[in-house]
Amino acid sequence: MKLDRIDRRILDILQRDGRISNLDLAERVGLSATPCARRVKRLEDSGLIRGTATLLDQARLGLKLTAYIGISMDRHTPDRFDAFEEQVRAFPEVMECSVVTGQSADYLLKAVIPDMQHYERFLLGKLTRIPGVTGVHSSFELRRVVQKTALPLDHVENDTEV
């Protein structure tokens, strides 16, 4: 699928306001409503648009602590990693989980929790009970400087294949 300037503009606007009406979107990109809706459908069908989400205010929901947690595993085997990943996916506190390199951890997790008491229960009652976890290193966010949900699109040129 090739992306042109209008496709990139549609993607940029939808990333920033997923609730925009098709009519408003069409006006902002310089199309009539029907061709705009067709383009959005094509972008969805291609998998470039994976869905739409509502962003909630973490602090107002009482989730005042963000932890970045490095997890070290005892063995680097597919079975061990699969079992860990399956369990971690089920934890509502875990917002992100990535396999990483370049540090002593095998995984890096981002978790949100109400407070340090809840973190202790999460750590001791869930994370360290997963078979294969041999080390946990936690860092806590003091202040969030940047938080974005929109991906950069500047590198995508006209008629770029995606």
Image (spheres, grey):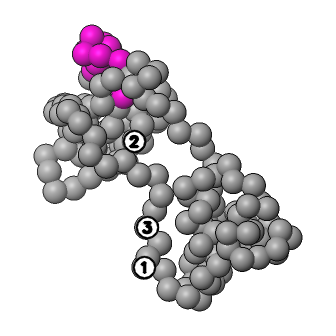
Give the left or right position of residue 3, taking residue 61 as reference: right
Q: Residue at x 67, y 73 (%)?
A: 29
Give the left or right position of residue 6, taking residue 117 as reference: right
Give the labeled residue for mark 2: 96
Stretch in magenta: 112-124
Q: Amino acid at mark 2?
A: Glu
Give the labeled residue for mark 1: 155
The span from disc 1 to disc 2 (Cα, nearest Å) is: 25 Å
Residue 122, quarter of the rendered image: top left
- Near mark 1 (Cα within 10 A), the count class, few <14, some 14-19 or many ≥20, is few
As drawn, 75 above or below 93: below
As drawn, 60 above or below 38: above
Q: Residue at x 33, y 23 (%)?
A: 64
Question: Which part of the image, by quadrant, shows the C terminus?
Answer: bottom right
Q: Please provide percent x and percent y for residue 110.
A: 33, 37
Give the labeled residue for mark 3: 152
